[in-house]
């Protein structure tokens, strides 16, 4: 009762990063509220999973281990989560804002008639006074999220319905081992009583999933190229600069669409959210859909031949000029000075 | 299902307040982009299944009838406007409840929605409607591969690949931006349907020629329902029916923070690199 649930998403037999990020945040919230952190895993061959989740602070690990749950299908997942939530009555339930989380968390919330806040960038505990009734609530979950294409930031609360449900995008929160590991006590879910035959009506006929090879999220230095790089050939300069600086390569959607580089490198609203120590935007104009994925970077350098480019508004350093001239100079002077 | 939304993607200078925030009321109202992809998916299904029809359902103020007309110009047969004060302040749950009440009455075989609306940005309404109606769902649909008598075979776009599923109908299908673009408005259809009006639009000026024309021709009438027309539980509508409450809204300030400026000159790049190394930004 009253604990915090984190739905653990499995990706090719491994725990998705976003789930570990949520456990890290969940641990912080659980400690503050003085309740338990409970991980919920639906998958197959989950033998050692609890050890890993405990490191991130999970006190309890609920498991439903069966072939039925891989690959993910909406209805069986929804049935199990709804059943378990009704049985255990957590006060908070967190999901990754991944294709999976955004597919079934809304269904769970709809079935349980509890609110769901999408794509939160911050989660905090705080008090709330209803402006109309004056009723006071203690220790609610503040669910903070951008909306309106990133033009506003809303703080959303869910005063009267439980659980308070939220989704969070990958890479938005930090992932860290807990100061003190959780007990990681495994509790099997009696899922057969929740899943009905009618939950199996959708059949998966074919799946083509590529392994995720490129990971730009973890990079502390990201050199990103945009449409202004001009060609696939010129885009190699972005790779050269990243190599020299020990960073990774990112891109804008226009660069990806133009075929300069692969989609896995796309930063932004429909790509990856990053927060590196240093972000170098080369020939990127800085449209809101792009900056939504990188404006949390500690430092931003823009290289652009247009002094009015919106990226310059969020940049700490703006270099005005041609990328093809500037990037080689940056490489040269970095090498000269770093020795 | 389609929603009229403020165009949050093209925030021009005139939509900015002096404080550097976005004046939402100044943004033009448009057809939610992914709902146009959904409309196209529905029209393609209609092209394949003889005798089928496509209708738009939208919940919103009277002016949301614009997107129903727009859809009719592109090939839809008609539409339903769900409108009224009772629906104000709905979160996604109350929105999906209201839409599901209307859908129970309409009882379509396939319900298409966009993946996500560009204002609320949640992508929750489609799945929530499916749950309220007890229907299976297929999210991120990119293409209907095969139409069978009692099911659809659909290709979905996932983060790192694709998946093909077979789903029995009735079902809810949410359509991704990567699906086919919507066909353009057809000039003949524009001529035919530009005088289509919703009930309250006719009532607002009953004597006008446009209203009289619409009143005389059934195909020019957009069905308009108030809350009472869809038999809802009033407790589940609008603000009352919304578990989530907006506690606070902060406008993001886009006002410029001054960037330190450099040119392409060698001295400039050199001093920048020296500064970054000295501050340990570069190791
Ligand atoms: C700043 C802000 C933040 C918000 N955050 C949340 C939140 O986190 N959780 C929450 O529950 N609510 C939230 N809301 C409320 C939410 O925006 C509204 O309930 C909205 O009506 C539906 O959500 P959406 O725009 O996200 O639609 P989505 O769920 O993104 O829409 C998906 C699809 O559903 C269909 N659809 C959606 N609305 C309609 C409609 N009115 N008529 C016909 N079809 C429709 C369309 O096909 C659309 O493409 C927020 C509102 C604001 C202003
Ligand atoms: C729903 C939606 C989602 C989106 N999601 C994303 C997303 O996730 N990520 C994303 O990045 N975009 C996204 N976009 C697209 C986004 O709106 C922009 O179109 C895109 O980011 C532009 O990419 P760009 O800056 O590389 O190209 P452009 O806007 O074409 O900018 C090129 C820039 O390079 C400069 N330039 C040109 N030549 C040179 C040169 N020789 N030297 C120096 N500078 C030069 C130009 O001045 C210009 O500023 C999305 C759009 C929509 C509608």
Image: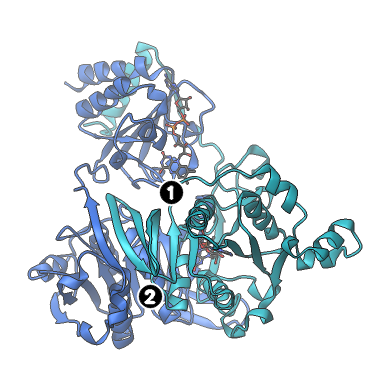
Chain colours: A blue, B cyan
Residue under numbered circle 2: A108
If the image is split into quadrants, where does the C terminus of chain B sit?
A: top left
* Residue B47 seen from this side: yes
* Dots 1 and 2 on the same chain: no
- Is B43 left, or right, of A65 in this rendering? right
Alpha-carbon distance for marks 1 and 2? 26 Å
The foreground one among B220 and B233 is B220
Q: Residue furthest front?
A: B50
Tell me: is circle 1 under 8 Å from ligand 1.
Answer: no
Residue at coordinates 74% horizontally, 60% vertically from top-left?
A: B220
Q: Which mark is residue B179?
A: 1
Q: Are marks 1 and 2 in contact (CB under 8 Å)?
A: no
The residue carrying pointer 1 sits among few (fewer than 14), some (14 to 19) or many (20 or more) residues within 10 Å by Cα, namely many
Identify the image quadrant of residue B264.
top left
Q: Chain of mark 1?
A: B
The foreground one among A70 and A233 is A70
Q: Residue furthest left?
A: A47
Residue B267 lies, in percent from the top left, at 36, 13
Residue at coordinates 72% horizontally, 62% vertically from top-left?
A: B219
If the image is split into quadrants, where does the N terminus of chain B sit?
A: bottom right
- Is A309 left, or right, of B240 in this rendering? left
The residue carrying pointer 2 sits among few (fewer than 14), some (14 to 19) or many (20 or more) residues within 10 Å by Cα, namely many
- Is A134 left, or right, of B125 in this rendering? right
Residue B147 lies, in percent from the top left, at 40, 60
């Amino acid at each position: 009762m009253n604990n915090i649930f984190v739905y653990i998403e499995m990706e090719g037999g491994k725990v998705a990063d976003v789930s570990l990020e949520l456990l890290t945040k969940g641990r912080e919230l659980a400690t503050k509220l003085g309740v338990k952190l409970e991980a919920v895993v639906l998958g197959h061959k989950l033998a050692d999973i609890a050890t890993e989740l405990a490191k991130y602070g999970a006190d309890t690990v609920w498991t439903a281990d069966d072939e039925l749950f891989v690959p993910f299908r909406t209805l069986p997942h929804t049935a199990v989560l709804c059943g378990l939530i009704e049985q255990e009555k957590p006060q908070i339930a967190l999901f990754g804002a991944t294709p999976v989380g955004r597919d079934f968390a809304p269904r769970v919330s709809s079935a349980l008639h509890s609110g769901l806040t999408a794509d939160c960038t911050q989660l905090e505990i705080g008090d709330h006074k209803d402006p109309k009734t004056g009723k006071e609530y203690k220790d609610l979950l503040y669910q903070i999220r951008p909306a309106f294409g990133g033009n506003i930031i809303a703080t959303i609360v869910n005063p009267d319905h439980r659980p308070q449900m939220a989704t969070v995008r990958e890479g938005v929160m930090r992932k860290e081992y807990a100061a003190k590991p959780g007990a990681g006590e495994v509790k099997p879910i009696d899922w057969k009583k929740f899943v009905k035959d009618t939950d199996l009506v959708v059949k998966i006929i074919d799946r083509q999933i590529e392994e995720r090879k490129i990971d730009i999220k973890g990079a502390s230095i990201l050199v990103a190229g945009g449409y202004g790089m001009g060609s696939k050939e010129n885009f190699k300069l972005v790779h050269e600069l990243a190599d020299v600086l020990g960073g990774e390569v990112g891109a804008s959607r226009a660069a990806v669409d133009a075929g300069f580089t692969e989609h896995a490198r796309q930063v932004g609203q429909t790509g990856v959210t990053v927060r590196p120590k240093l972000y170098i935007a080369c020939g990127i104009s800085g449209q809101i859909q792009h900056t939504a994925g990188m404006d949390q970077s500690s430092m931003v350098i823009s290289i652009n031949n247009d002094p009015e480019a919106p990226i310059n508004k969020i940049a700490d350093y703006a270099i005005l000029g041609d990328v093809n001239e500037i990037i080689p100079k940056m490489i040269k002077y970095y090498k000269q000075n770093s020795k | 299902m389609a929603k009229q939304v403020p165009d949050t993607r093209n925030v021009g200078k005139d939509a900015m307040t002096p404080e550097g925030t976005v004046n939402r009321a100044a943004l033009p109202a448009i057809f939610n982009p992914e709902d146009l992809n959904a409309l196209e998916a529905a029209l393609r299904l209609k092209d394949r299944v003889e005798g089928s029809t496509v209708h738009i359902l939208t919940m919103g103020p009277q002016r949301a009838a614009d997107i129903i007309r727009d859809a009719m110009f592109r090939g839809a047969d008609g539409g339903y406007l769900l409108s009224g004060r009772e629906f104000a302040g709905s979160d996604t749950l109350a929105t999906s409840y209201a839409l599901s009440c209307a859908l129970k009455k309409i009882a379509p075989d396939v319900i298409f929605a966009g993946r996500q609306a560009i204002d609320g940005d949640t992508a929750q309404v489609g799945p929530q409607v499916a749950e309220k109606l007890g229907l299976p769902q297929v999210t991120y649909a990119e293409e209907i591969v095969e139409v069978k008598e009692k099911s659809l075979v659909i290709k979905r776009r996932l983060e790192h690949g694709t998946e093909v599923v077979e789903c029995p109908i009735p079902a809810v299908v949410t359509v991704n931006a990567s699906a086919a673009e919507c066909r353009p408005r057809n000039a003949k259809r524009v001529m035919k349907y530009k005088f289509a009006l919703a009930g309250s639009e006719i009532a607002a000026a009953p004597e006008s020629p446009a209203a009289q024309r619409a009143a005389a021709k059934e195909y020019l009438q957009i069905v308009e329902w108030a809350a009472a027309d869809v038999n809802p539980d009033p407790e589940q509508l609008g603000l009352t029916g919304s578990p989530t409450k907006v506690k606070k809204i902060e406008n993001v300030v886009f006002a410029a923070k001054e960037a330190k400026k450099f040119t392409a000159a060698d001295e400039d790049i050199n001093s920048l690199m020296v500064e970054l190394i000295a501050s340990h930004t570069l190791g």
